[in-house]
Image (tube, grey):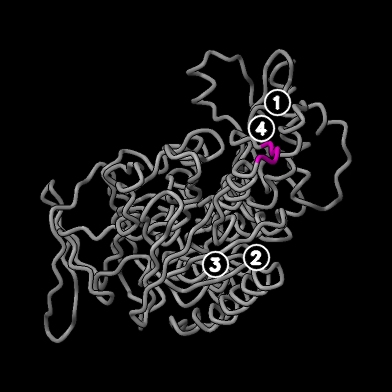
Amino acid sequence: MVQYDYDLAVIGSGPAGHHAAIQGAKLRKRVLVVERKPIVGGVCVNLGTVPSKTIREAILYLSGYRERTVYGESYRVKEQITFQDLLFRVEPVVHAEIDVMRDQLLRNHVGLMNASASFADPHTLRLQRADGSQATVTADKVVIAVGTESIRDSRMPIDGRDVFCSDDILQLDELPRTLAVIGAGVIGCEYASMFAALGVRVTLVDMRPRLLGFVDAEIIDTLTYHMRERRMVLRLGEEVSSVEPFEEAGIRRVRTRLASGKQLVTDKVLTSTGRNSATRDLNLGSVGISADSRGRIKTRAYYQTEVDNIYAAGDVIGFPSLASTSKEQGRIATCNAFGVPATYSPELFPYGIYTIPEISFVGRTEEELTEKGIPYEIGKAQYREVARGKIVGDQIGVLKLVFHRETHELLGVHIIGDAATELVHIGQAVLSLKGSVDYFINTVFNYPTLAECYKNAALDGINRIND
């Protein structure tokens, strides 16, 4: 029997890698995490999810956004908000999260090595440390969880100051008065709405005819409406031909030219045209693993790659590229690698999009059910119809239930509004148990809560059938 240095080697310490490693440790396996950065957490903790959501929370508080329906549009907690005000809240949160993750690895006896990894063979990794020294380790099983990096488009001279990507956000020195956001994926939409909430004049540009095509169309229509209410200009179906920083009268600006002939002149440009999987230096070809043009690794069931002992999880395998789904993928990959039964239901993964207002959903959309010819009905509730909506100052929120017209089985939950990403889990539980909308009708919810919207939406849906 071959003796390896480790039972499991995990490349990357983001959500997928972290949970893959912890699961391996809980199975009493010898686990090593290889992380090329001197800190754990990957993009999620250090540059992406945690910082951006912390900045978002700071924006909602300092701008007085949630209170404006009560105190008026001019209400502010702080009149002149600087980018340093936002970062003040980010640093302690990031440091605390890193500390928690390191503690979890240490107390579970997971080895951690700061180095860049590449494959020598399916069981052997070459490690290049920052100090130039090299090492080689062997492992029975390997989980690739290297995450992604921002695409650097040659048409966009990204300098981290005038033209920047989401990875550069924490390096900004000041808030722009005007901003062009190129790319209306999840990241682009989130940052566009966050800057707009601060009063920045935002123009959002994307080649696609609508925002976030995987989200329920009615929810996106609502988001689009409120983006425009915040003075945001949407240039959809438009292609960027060039981005050019320039200086005029001592003021630095950026000119964005569109293929249609339009020009945008703004203080700064945020490019959000997608992310590539960070697999370039892994030497995947040497072990027979192929990656697509975006560096994404294709996996089989339970996140197993073309090579039986190598798994891949998280953003490196592509959609949905969410921290929540990545955690579960990492756990499932490790369980399967060591023959431990683990059930998972990707169709019940919830999606959270932290725009302002935020969006969350689980299950099927109306468009999917229409395409499959499944008879369904919907029920909707407005936040303004429940007391809690008025109390928290959210008059725009909507909760929509999609259910089978004949059996009443719940098929999907779609929410836009305050606490949507928390509220969705009630519907997720009912979906996972194959429950019906009748559950919501026969359940008593605390008063006053946003959860009451479930009952109102269920009653609305049943009334549509019976009327």
Tag 3 and tag 2, C-beta contact below 8 Å: no
Residue drawn at 39 percent across, 44 percent down: 297
> Does 314 appear above or below 37?
above
What x and y, as percent, mark residue 187?
Answer: 42, 56
Q: Which residue is mark 1?
A: 461
User: Which type of secondary structure does the marked residue at label 3 adopt?
Assistant: helix
Name the residue type under label 4: Leu
Q: Are marks 4 and 2 in contact (CB under 8 Å)?
A: no
Q: Left or right: where does residue 13 sit relative to residue 69?
A: left
User: Is residue 360 depicted above or below 203 in this figure?
Assistant: above
Q: Which span is picked out in magenta?
A: 339-343
Residue type pointed to by label 1? Gly
Cα distance between the residues tagged 3 and 4: 29 Å
Determine the CA span between mark 3 and mark 1: 37 Å
- The amino acid beneath tag 3 is Val
Give the residue pinned by disc 3.
50
Q: Relative to the observer, which residue lies in front, 250 or 13?
A: 13
Q: CA distance from mark 4 to mark 2?
A: 29 Å
